[in-house]
Amino acid sequence: MIEESKQPEQHLSDDAWNFSFVLGGPLFQLLRRVHLSDDSFGLLRRRMVIFALIAWLPLLIFSILEGNAYNQTLRIPFLLDIETHARYLLALPLLIYAEYLVNNRIRPIVRQFSERNLVDEPSQLEGPVHSAFRLRNSIFAEFILIAIVYSLGVFVRRETALSTSTWYAIVKDGESAWTHTGLWYAYVTLPIFQFILLRWYYRIFVWGRFLWQISRVKLNLMPTHPDHVGGLGFLGNTAFAFSPILTAHGVLLSGMIANRIFYTGAKLVNFKLEIIGMILVLLVIVLSPLLVFAVQLNRTKRAGLREYGVFAQRYVRKFDQKWLRSDTDETLLGSGDIQSLADLGNSFQVIREMRLYPFTKETILQLAIATLIPLLPLVLTMFSLEQLLDQFLKTVF
């Protein structure tokens, strides 16, 4: 048994055995050189703190020097800008943490395909692995992301900014102009965040392409597997690794809504479509890569229903002939035929309930909750302080 457990490892390269679609790329190499990461995304706390300080601390210093840190003449001074603090002190560290979590959760994936004998030859996994590594390590891809950040990204920020004077932009005669702190924000701080966020979208694309290539390999799926997805149930657990990314998006939306509630008089209910839309889009982004196995799962399910249907027909016919149509002297008491019939029925039911996607409704619910958690404090804005105190006193007394 020991020799059999080691067999998959002997057929997989070190790259495939330690697969990671996040552990690489020019930025990762830079982080290693400046001692903000080791070879396996260690030094996590240092990296989270440093990135947050690089993005947020210069804005605080420059806004103080410019007199906009707590300027009462501004609609939103820097210290009261909830969206900015949420973006750089919460969402950015969450995106950094997600690298560590995804790397640890996704790393065993390739070896799982081998250890579970889902492929005839483990070498069939090498092509998708090396293809994913080429995209992961692409200098050109990260260059394109930087180009997008410094073209479309700054334009989007200008167009979606609040139409009121803030620490980063002054509105005068209907025209908005960057402050000196705002220029640093627009061309240094914001691009750092946007690059890391877009880099995650690119990585999820690499992950989805990798799974698509795996799905083109003939997989040895079992229709009676108790996970109801032919043995691919372990893939559903990978979705939870992306929870910090979804929570980070929830933080971003929560900060944006909070600013509009407190400074433009908006109501939380005004953003229900944005909240629902964001949840749906994020669920599609995270779960859609797992749908590439639907074709093989559907083929396995249909083959299982056909083959087990034929087998069940032969069995129940013989059972009927033996116990109902013949004068057998055997006693039914203690016979294993009834249990075998029940087991056959259970196996057939497992095939009928087989899903075409390797995740469950619980997975969808938990990911949706991870996105919604940062929005929960905003529910308090729907009630006045008097209402909250009155409800609290009624609850306690």
Image (cartoon, grey):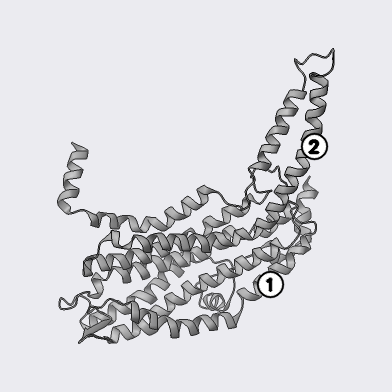
Measured from the top left, where is residue 252 in percent x and y? 37, 67
Q: Secondary structure at mark 2?
A: helix
Which quadrant would residue 74 be assigned to in this image?
bottom left
Q: Which residue is pictured at 14% across the width and 50% down the height?
A: 386
In the picture, measured across the screen, residue 121 lies left or right of residue 195, that is right
Q: Which residue is pictured at 42% across the width and 73% down the height?
A: 51
Q: Which residue is pictured at 46% across the width and 70% down the height?
A: 47
Residue at mark 1: 131
Q: Secondary structure at mark 1?
A: helix
Measured from the top left, where is residue 10 in percent x and y? 78, 59
Measured from the top left, where is residue 66 in percent x and y? 23, 84
Query: Crowding at label 1, few (<14), some or many (≥20) Cα neighbours within 10 Å?
Result: some
Residue at mark 2: 311
* Sequence-wise first label, 2 or 1: 1
Q: CA distance from mark 2 to mark 1?
A: 42 Å
Quadrant the N terminus occupies: top right
Q: Nearer the viewer, mark 2 or mark 1?
A: 2
Q: Is 250 located above or below residue 3 in the figure?
A: below
Count of numbered circles on the image: 2
In the picture, measured across the screen, residue 246 lies left or right of residue 289, that is left
Query: Crowding at label 2, few (<14), some or many (≥20) Cα neighbours within 10 Å?
Result: few
Measured from the top left, where is residue 140 in percent x and y? 59, 83
The amino acid marked with disc number 1 is Ser
Quadrant the C terminus occupies: top left
Q: Is 34 located above or below residue 21 in the figure?
A: below
The amino acid marked with disc number 2 is Phe
